[in-house]
Amino acid sequence: KLVARKKPIIYQLDDPLYLPYKSHSNGYLSYLKFFGKIKEIIKISKSVIANSTHIREYCLQYNKNVWQVPSVVDTDQFIYKPFDKNLKRVCIGWSGSQSTLKNVKLVENPLQILTEKNICDIFFIGGTEFNLSNVNYTARNWQAETEVEDLRNLHIGLVPLPEHPWNKHKFIMKTAQYMALGIVPVGTPMASNLEVIRHGENGFLAGTDNEWIEYLTILSEDNRLLNEMSAKCAFEAQEKYSLQANMPKVIEAFRNAVERKS
């Protein structure tokens, strides 16, 4: 608060840190954190940048100078290359961190059905052991140097999200990254997926096993639809989720803070 009297604070909030939570590393000690400090920081900030609608709405309770800027994709690296129009076999996949490997387990049954149908390949990035039974897949660990090239193996990107208080508030970066490369997302209807994925136009929202099976099968068997959605994904990622597209809002937020510093 002393600093805020002399210098403008620009606060960027990418996670719903105001929600009490138990972390994997700290366990119940997490609850000793002062979660109420988030609203106090928002109050004394000159500008607040929030990356999701839920977080923006929370911030607006305590500050009127809030800009919603999604987590942006580096489109200088995530460069769209159209799929082969005569694609012989589609690859469905997932990319994530070690802490989110368990998310793939949420779609184990649909992946089992797809394995039985043998209509696609399945490829995971982020680990090598996913504890899936009766699912034929290949996998490799995530590496920054090969991230984009590894993702280019995918044509359809899985975005399964577990029920968790945090997830409902978040901007799901994975969805935007898939789209920038033209990878068509199929995801849980939760958080920013509800806004980013336009069901049936640039991807699909799947809330049940039967829906996962239906939409993944449709995309695996319809090359024309897959390519149309892929092109829409890449265009929308460039228009909405790139740094270039969001730069004016970031600049406006900074200018607002500087102009109001007195």
Image: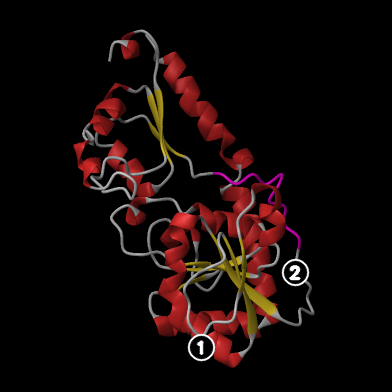
Q: Residue furthest bottom?
A: 117
User: In the image, residue 214 lies at what x, y percent?
Assistant: 50, 85
Quarter location, residue 205: bottom left
Query: What is the three-letter code of the residue carrying label 1?
Result: Ile
Vertical position of residue 3 compared to residue 31: above or below = above
Q: Amino acid at mark 2?
A: Phe
Name which residue lies at 67% across and 71% down: 228
The segment highlighted magenta reads 72-81
Note whether residue 79 is visible: yes
Question: How crowded is the residue under tag 2: few (<14 C-alpha within 10 Å), some, or many (20+)?
Answer: some
Q: Secondary structure at mark 2?
A: loop
Q: Is residue 206 visible?
A: no
Inter-mark Cα distance, 1 to 2: 25 Å
Q: Residue at x 54, y 69 (%)?
A: 203
Residue 132 percent coordinates (x, y): 48, 77
Q: Secondary structure at mark 1?
A: helix
Q: Is residue 77 magenta?
A: yes
Q: Which mark is residue 70?
A: none
Residue 133 colored in magenta in the image? no
User: Is 10 displayed left or right of 2 in the figure?
Assistant: right
The residue identified by callout 1 is: 113
